[in-house]
Structures are given as structure tokens and as C-alpha cells.
Amino acid sequence: MYLKKHLSIAILSALAFFLLPFNPAKASDGPNIPEIQALINRVTHGRASEFNLQPITAAVDTFYLANEDNKIAIKASSTIAMAKGFNYYLKNICHVSVTWYAADSVIMPAVLPKAFTPAGERCRFDNRFFLNYCTFGYTTVWWKWNHWQHFIDWMAMNGINMPLAITGQEYIWQRVWRKFGMTDEQSRAFFTGPVHLPWQRMGNLDRWQGPLPQSFIDGQFELQKKILTRERALGMHPILPAFAGHVPKDLKKKYPDIKLTNLGSYDTGAENDAYFLDPMDPLFVKIQKEYLSEQQKLWGTDHYYGADPFNEMDPPSWEPSFLAKTAASIYGGMKAIDPKAVWIQMGWTFYYDRKHWTNPRLEAMIKAVPQNHMMILDYFCEQTEVWRITDGFFNAPYIWCYLGNFGGNTQLAAPVLKTAKLLSATEDDPNHRQMTGIGSTLEGFGVNEFMFEWLFDYAWNTGAKDPANWIKKYAESRCGHNDPVITAAWTKLLPVIYNSDVSDVGLGNIIQSKPMLKGNGGYTWLGKYNYQALANIFPQFLLADSASKANPNYTRDLAMLEKQVLVNLAVSLRDSVGRAYHSKNQQLFNKYTGLFLDLCDDVDRITATQHELLLGAWIKEARDFGSTPEEKNYYEKNARLLITTWGGEGNGITDYAAKDWSGMISTYYKGRWTLFFNELRKTIDTGKEPDMDAFDKQRAAFDWKWVNTNQSQQPFKWNTTGNTYSVVVDIYKKWAPYL
């Protein structure tokens, strides 16, 4: 049945009540209409006057769309619901896709369509959480206000109301540590360099690549004020940091009797080890109170606080009583400053080390906090739903989360079909206990952005339970209109690369791998899907109509797909190199090593057409934080380090954050493979296996030299080059015979 345009809002509301499933949730505040008008103007370049924004009353976040008085009427119960309604109009009626990147243009139709079927949605989940501590290193570390402003708009338009907000906390910690006798120089030395701050904040390491420049500390504090102001204005409830026991080792100089436990440093050296303060020490609660008091004074509060003791670290004791006392101390300090405090605890800890985090230990920790004052993020549900093996976290509120990306890996794969089944099963399970929402805990932005848009749309749109139908509307938004050829191609992609592959650590490709003749590096796990099936689907994307070809979102998808097809092909080329080497066939060896390196160049050329895939852009954003050549080089080293060795030379986390980025492929990955092939040439006639231990030392030295090179020695472009469609077609013609 179709609703007529002249239906009154009362009738529309009544119909929507029956058409949309009911799930009780707390009432939302009314919409902040001036803020939504400003958001619409930012996205549409000043066309908010064509929209009629009206508040309505509803028990849960709800919006309706209609055409009234030749304007697009958006009627909503909250600011977030109104932003979501606006995004519904863009995607489903205008076929416009707004990405999470500020650099991406939004292509609006010249005339906004006003003849459309009225529609409405309401949210089935009270809480919609987004981000991860690691995202503030792998993605947002170099962002300035223009990036954040656009991204906050994107979050609002996707219905997110609980963003993690941890930027700039070092400024407050510096003020706190002064009160406990430390100088600013000591606290700056305690902090890591910018890109490793997420792990310093989680208590995993100290000092690495520090001391942190004071200008960075001050600038991030001012940036956080803007972030929080805008997030709150758009109806979000940011999650701010709290104290979880991690303290500077230098604190013992002032307080020699305190008990500290060494928690290690992620293999970056003993000098970078992190320390945990005994929760029974009176200083523990004092620090919590001082921090939250300062934070509340400078930033206000929404009563949500993130605290994550023992993340990927062993606590001083596994006794349930000790864990309970730790939790009681952490929450006790929160409550003393904010009686409404809710502790947000990431459940990654309990998934990652399930062997030690047994149910009795976890239960003791959770139940040491008053009921409903600790909320768990079930962090990696597409892999393991911890709520199912802990009796719903012992009835604590929890949020079902999809992780989906480790380190900002750029592999084209996401288990949307599997996630849809798991999430629906949880939602429909009568014993799901206090499931209060859904969220995503991605470590970094990469490809597969649609997966996160789908996840948050699921909270509102019951049709999203069937991704095969959902993807059709998404395809239209990527082309700017209904292009049947592209819609059919997206539909074919689902069962191939978006079916059951689990997002996992090190989802990469062979080009990114540490060079070897068989297998792959530990942090470049290869996708399990049918590579040939993807290669067969890809040519259909080349058959788009002229309107699609003019849309940058379509050409972005095209570049991502061809990139993936080629890095998949690299596996067979590498294997051919291995066969030629072991058969002592110098001619074939030279042929296939040449093809492999040529392929690297073409992947580099494809990625050069996309801004988000430019190493030069990442480095430029880092260098822009410096005001002197020395500072610029310091920030550049930080930027290079995180995406390569992570730690020092030969570090075990090398390649964790592997990227298919133009500039990085040509100078870093290709450079390593060239070094490897040259070493193999020395022994191809002997038939001996290559000495991989010796080569790995050479490779580690190469990696570390690359990290310590800077823009003046190795410049990279930060602007895109080439027409995407032309480049893709040219490269496809070249490699089609091998596909």
C-alpha cells in the first residue's frame, strides 16, 4: 500500500506505528533544528531552505519524510533522527552517497526531487556506538577540524549517538600529573608519539617515540572542544576517558611506597614498559577523582566513561577478589565525581584472552559495579559473541559490535551476510538479556565502507536484514541513479566476497606480505573467497552507463575492485616465481619476477587515482603539524612507523597495518620484493632453499631505513593523478590475459 502525499502527520504516524516493529526505549530529546539546517547546508552546499524541518513526539528515535508545500518535509523526534531522515532522503530518493571522508565530494542533483512516496523509520536500538581507541591512531590522528566536522556529520546521518571521544586527553592528564608532583617535561616523556597514543591510553606502552610535543598536546585539546560541542549539538552522547590504573613510572619518585606492576610494552623495549597502580592504594581513587574533575570542568560530561584495565595485558592477580576490587576502585572514583556515571568497558579484553578471563573472574569484575552502571561493548561479534558464553555478561547492559577492520587493512572483504544472520539471531533471541544497542569497533578506515553504513542502517531499517535487497539501493547511491548493470554486479559480489569471511587480524594480500616463496606473512592473511569469481564479475562494472562513469563514487568502487583483482593475481605470479626458482629455470624466473614487479607498479597507478589511497596525503597531513623542518620530520617518522614496523627494527608487529597506498606500494612493498628476488638470483643455480633468516634481517633493515627516510629524500604526491576510469580500463586490458 502506498501512502498519499496529502496524508496528515497523525495518520502517517499511526500507520508507521503498525508498520514498524516496536521496541521500547527511552524517549529522545527534541530535534535541534538550527543544527540540522547547518548540517544540510554543509552537505548540500547551502540548500537547507528546500527542506521543511518539523519536530514530532515519539518514544524512540523516529523520522518521517513527505512532500509538503513543494518542500521536502523531515519530521523527527530527535536531532539524530532528523539527520538520519535527511540521509534516507539523499540515499533512497536522490541516490546520493555521502562518505566518511572530508575530501570526497557530494554530487547533488540540480533539482531536488520532491515527488516521492512518503516514508518513515524508527530506531529499534537505544544505543549506536562507533569507533575504537585504535581508530585514533590508524585513521584520525592527523585530522584537523575540517575532517572531524565532516565525519561528525556522517555519524549523525548514519544514526550514531555514542561516539568514542578520546582526542586531546593528554592536556588534562598533564594538569593532573602536575598535582601529583610531576613536571610537564616528565609527563610529555611519559606520553608516546602521536600515532601510538591509542595504546598509551589503553595502558599498553609508554614513551615510545616521545616525548610528545607540547604544541600537539595543546592543539588536540582545543580540537576536542570543537568535537564535543558539535557531537552534543547533534544529539550525541560522547564517551570520554577515565582512569583505569595506568600511571607514569616517575610517579614512584614522588610516592616511593606505591605498588606498581610492570605490564610490558608491546616489544618496543623495557624503557617503554607501562605500569599499573595497585587499586587498593589510596592514590588510585584520588587520581580518578582529579582526572574526572578536571575533565568535567573543561569539557563537561554526558556521564559515559571509557576505562579498560588490562587490555591485552595480564593483571597483577587473576584472583576474582582482586579483579572485583579493581573494578570497585575504578567505578568508585567515577561515582564520587559523577553519580550518574556509566562505565563503558570494551569486551575485546574478554575475547582476546578468554583462557584467563573465565566466567567467575569476569562475573566478579562486572558485579563489583552497581547494576546498569557498567556497559560492555561486545567487541568482535562477527567472530565470537561473548554475550552468549557469559549469560549475557551476567545481565550487564551490552552493545553488539561488528569490528570488521584491523589496522585499517585495505582488503576487499567483509562478512555482511554472516553478520546479518548473527545480528538478527541476537535481536530475536528471547534470552539476549540487556542488549541495548549495536555498534562498530573498527580499528581503522579502509575499504568496505558500505559494511558500516549497512550496520547502522540495520538499527532503523528492517529491510537491511536482507543485505541482497539493501545493496541495490546502495548501488544506486554509488552511481547517482539506477544503473541496472551495476546493481546486478553489486548483487553478484555479495555471495563471493561479502559472505562468510570473518574480519580478522592481518587481512591483507601477497604484495603487502613479507617476501617469501610460499605462504604469506603472519599479518597479511589472504581472503578465503574465490579469486576467479571476483575476476569474472569485475568486467561487468566496466559496462556502466555514462552517468555512472561521471560519478566519483562509482569510479572509487571501480578502482577498489580492480586493485583487489590484481593483488589476488599477484599470488599466482609469486607462486610461478617459486616454481621457476626451484626448477632452476632462470628464464621463467626473470619473466615472472618481472611480471610481479610490473603488477606492483600498476596497483600503485590505480591507487594514485584515489585520495584516500595516497601515502603522500597521509605524510602531508602529518608534516602539517610541524612548524620547523625538525618537527615535520618527527611527525613524518611517526606516520611512516605506524603503517610499517609499528615498533623498532624487526618488530613482531611489522605489517599489522598494511596498506594498498600509492607511493607505499612502489617504494616499500615493491622494494622489499625486489630485494628478495635479487637475493634469490644468487642461489637459483644451486637449487638450495633460500636462507630466510638471513633475508629477514636484510628485509628488517630495509623496513627501518624506509621508516627513517623523509619527504625531502623521498617525496610523494598528495594529489590524485590520472582519470580513474581510463586508468582502470587501460590496466585491465593489459592484465586480462592473465585473469
Image (cartoon, grey):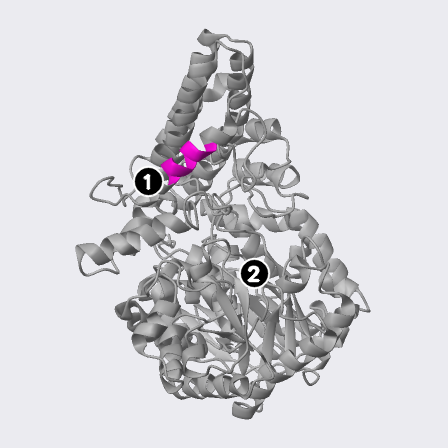
Residue range corresponding to the magenta coloring: 696-703
Residue 422 visible: yes
Quarter residue 353 falls in: bottom right
For image coordinates 30% across by 67% down, the residue present is: 216
Number of numbered discs overlaid on the protein picture: 2
| Nearer to us in this view, 662 or 20 | 662
Q: Secondary structure at mark 2?
A: loop
Q: The residue under label 2 is which amino acid type?
A: Thr
For image coordinates 48% across by 54% down, the residue present is: 444
| Nearer to us in this view, 157 or 257 | 257
Q: Rate crowding at label 1 as few (under 14), some (14 to 19) or many (20 or more) other CA atoms within 10 Å.
A: few
Q: Rate crowding at label 2 as few (under 14), some (14 to 19) or many (20 or more) other CA atoms within 10 Å.
A: many
Q: Main secondary structure of the magenta part?
A: helix
Quickly name the residue at label 2: 441
Quickly name the residue at label 1: 705
Q: Is residue 10 left or right of residue 257?
A: right
C-alpha separation, residue under disc 1 versus residue under disc 2: 33 Å
Inspect the magenta stretch and tell me whether residue 391 lies in it: no
Q: Is residue 488 left or right of residue 683?
A: right
Q: Is 361 located above or below residue 523 in the figure?
A: below
Q: Is residue 171 left or right of residue 1?
A: left
